[in-house]
Amino acid sequence: MAGALSSRNRRTTRRSSSAKAKTRTQGRRKRSQRRLGRTYDSALSLPLTGRKSLRTLRPLAGIRRGKVVFFLGLGLIVLAALGYWLFLTDDFYVYEITVRGNRLISSEEIFAASGLYGWSIFWVNPQEVADTVASMPGILSAEVECSLPNRVTITVVEREPQVVWQRAGMRWLVDEQGVVLSAQAGAEGGLVVEDQDGHPLQPGARVDAAAVAAARQLQELLPELTTVRYTPQKGLSFTHALGCEVYLGTGTDMAEKLAILEALVEHLKASGERPEYIDLRFKESPCYK
């Protein structure tokens, strides 16, 4: 009897152990299935989420493109308006200028020579304009300044007339470099250099600068002298009170030559000689005949 009970207990124990094991196995399977289900659901939900993101981004991209097009169009309109204002209105075009430093040449002449009338201020090259103005016969140098919207200022240094040069019946004002400036206006006094060359002069032409320097010195040393003659071979000459021609040449040593002339005249007066000419072109070896 006891043996039969013991055998039943063992079978009951095995059954309950087997049931517990089966229950644990089923529990594991359910948990695994739940985990697999969540993983599968997550995997299935990923493409859906991506599709939702794309649908959300497409309107945003369209809005951005619209903004770019709007601002691009606005920029083009602003540029067109700016270009119209800068180049199609008179605000930036030169129709008058300011000239400084001129006394002998009028502002109108300088403006005309500059070629600036009607030019856009953006196309003005100050150095080119200065070079053009400086090439005028009466201008020694020029500076050009530009400022917006259309202001141009030209400052000039004029050539100063030094002597009156006469050729072919016309008298011209000439500066120290021998540049012919303009025809003499009126009958001003001073020393006149009578050029024996018959070819007429024009503004901007050049004569012998060394002869101009000599004439300037003679004006100071012999203020009573009103006329001298000029030839390239003999330079300056004039008729002395003795009735002879005096050849002085050119250059800046007129004071020395006139001192030699004075000594020679004293000698000639003392000797009673009446020379035909006195040649002082070479002061180291003066001569007379």
Image (spheres, helix red, strand yellow):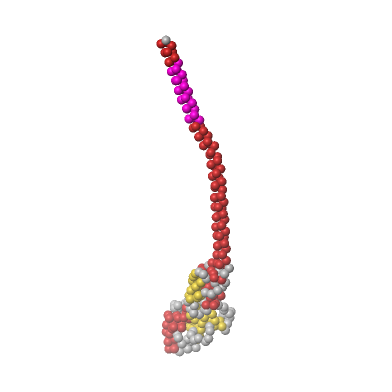
Q: Residue at the spot x=57%, y=51% of the render?
A: 62
> Which sits in the foreground, 271 or 126?
126
Q: Residue at the spot x=43%, y=89% of the render?
A: 270
Q: Residue furthest left?
A: 2
What is the total number of numbered labels drawn onto the structure image? 0
Q: Residue at the spot x=54%, y=52% of the render?
A: 64
Which span is picked out in magenta? 11-33
**What secondary structure do most residues of the magenta stretch adopt?**
helix
> Which sits in the foreground, 89 or 184?
89
Q: Quadrant of the N terminus?
A: top left
Classify 79 as above or below 262: above
Q: Give the percent coordinates (x, y) of residue 181.
A: 53, 78
Is 28 included in the stretch rendered in magenta?
yes
Q: Give the percent coordinates (x, y) of residue 72.
A: 56, 57
Q: Is residue 166 visible?
A: no
Q: Residue at the spot x=49%, y=81% of the render?
A: 163
> Which sits in the foreground, 55 or 31?
31
Q: Give the percent coordinates (x, y) of residue 2.
A: 41, 11
> Which sits in the foreground, 25 or 178?
25
Q: Give the percent coordinates (x, y) of residue 242.
A: 48, 88
Q: From the viewer's perspective, is 82 left or right of 9? A: right
Q: From the viewer's perspective, is 65 left or right of 9? A: right
Q: Is residue 6 visible?
A: yes
Is 106 included in the stretch rendered in magenta?
no
Classify 237 as above or below 1: below
